[in-house]
Amino acid sequence: MTAAEPDRQAKIGQQFIQAVPHMRELGIELLAIGGGEARMRVPYDERFVGDPKTGVIHGGVLTALLDSCCGAAVMSHPGGPAGTATIDLRIDYMRAARPGRAVTAHATCYRLTRSVAFVRALAFEDDPDDPVAAAHGAFTVERPARAGKSGGGKA
Amino acid sequence: MSARPPIEPVQVVKARRDAALARLTGGIPYARFLGVSFQRLGDEITAQLSFDPKLIGNPMLPALHGGVTGAFLELTAQVELAWSIVWRRMESGGEAAAAIERGEFPPMPKTVDFTVDYLRSGLPRDAYARARVNRAGRRYASVHVEAWQDNRDKPFAAATGHFVMPRLDEAG
């Protein structure tokens, strides 16, 4: 079985967003996915503001964006995990996100072992060299149920 | 030595503290968006995340979105630190307390970094969190926070964050 036809990857990506209520609620868009990398964007929204005096979105929105993007990168890794969940995620906030601007995240799953995926990501408006935030995380790797295991048969 | 000030009636003290907390947290649109509210007993505050289907990250389990859990912890840690600053000023009396009374709050502490430990999946129900300021210096602070659902002894997530302390001359 070939693991990574582009069509299959794109389909997985769209399903990934649509299947996750909180990503829909934030208006997150999937821009690209495949080969252990993912790119997502969250629009600016006044409901996301952390400090009305400045109009800057709260760091929590970036946490949700980066966590989602890292999870998608893990799922798109050629190693083919069947599922994933965050073990830990560290976010460094370099500066405030510019009010009124969408924020894009790019995540790379740079190492996948049998049980753990290691991921890093950046969040920025336009230029990855001028990041708003960076993330580094470890995620679980769920393996597909073995063929022949009882109860797992296809119709 | 000056005479001890008269003891204020309890309802006056409570009303002042509740008003300060409401003012501190009521102005955060993102807290409203997530459904996070804050309850106070003395100086201790507990954050509550009221469950809503829009907070789901994994509909198969179902489980809260990891980003929601992280955001809830971060809000709680930030508000706890800000509250500890407001509380100290409010209780100190004098000009600092008068400024709080006029609604002149220090700016929110800015997050430097935040590390979330996901201990178990968040169930589709309300969650609570309390934070502890481990150290607040003149410039930086370190804050630890834990969130739980049904059982206080079984946190589903914990986090440590570092913050830049607001400069108190920036109050406004």
Image (cartoon, coloured by chain):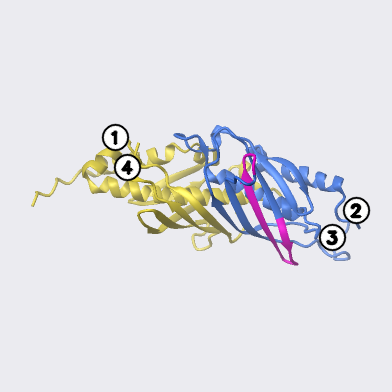
Between disc 2 and disc 4, the foreground one is 4
Task: Say which of A8 and A93 sits in front.
Answer: A93
* Residue at the image point whose x is 58% and y is 33% from the top: A45
> Judging from the image, what is the letter of the chain drawn in blue?
A
Gap between marks 2 and 4 measured at Cα: 69 Å
Gap between marks 2 and 3 measured at Cα: 10 Å
Q: Earlier in the sequence, mark 4 or mark 1?
A: 1
The image's mark for residue B169 is 4
Q: How packed is label 2: few (under 14 Cα within 10 Å), some, or many (20 or more)?
A: few
| SS label for mark 2 | loop
Q: How packed is label 1: few (under 14 Cα within 10 Å), some, or many (20 or more)?
A: few
Asked if the residues shown at circle 1 and circle 2 are in contact, with their CB atoms under 8 angstroms apart, the answer is no
Callout 4 and callout 1 share a chain: yes
Q: How packed is label 4: few (under 14 Cα within 10 Å), some, or many (20 or more)?
A: few
The image's mark for residue B102 is 1
- Residue A114 is situated, as x and y percent measured from the top left of the image, at 75, 67
- Would you identify the image quadrant in which residue A102 lies? top right
* Residue at the image point whose x is 44% and y is 55% from the top: B131
Between disc 4 and disc 1, the foreground one is 4
Mark yes or no: residue A127 visible.
yes
Q: Which residue is mark 2?
A: A155
Asked if the residues shown at circle 3 and circle 1 are in contact, with their CB atoms under 8 angstroms apart, the answer is no
The tint chain B carries is yellow
Between disc 1 and disc 2, the foreground one is 1
Q: Amino acid at mark 4?
A: Asp
| SS label for mark 1 | loop
Callout 1 and callout 2 share a chain: no
Task: Say which of B83 and B167 sits in front.
Answer: B167
Q: Which residues are magenta?
A: A109-127
Q: Is residue B160 above or below residue B10?
A: below
Between disc 4 and disc 3, the foreground one is 4
Q: Which residue is mark 3?
A: A152
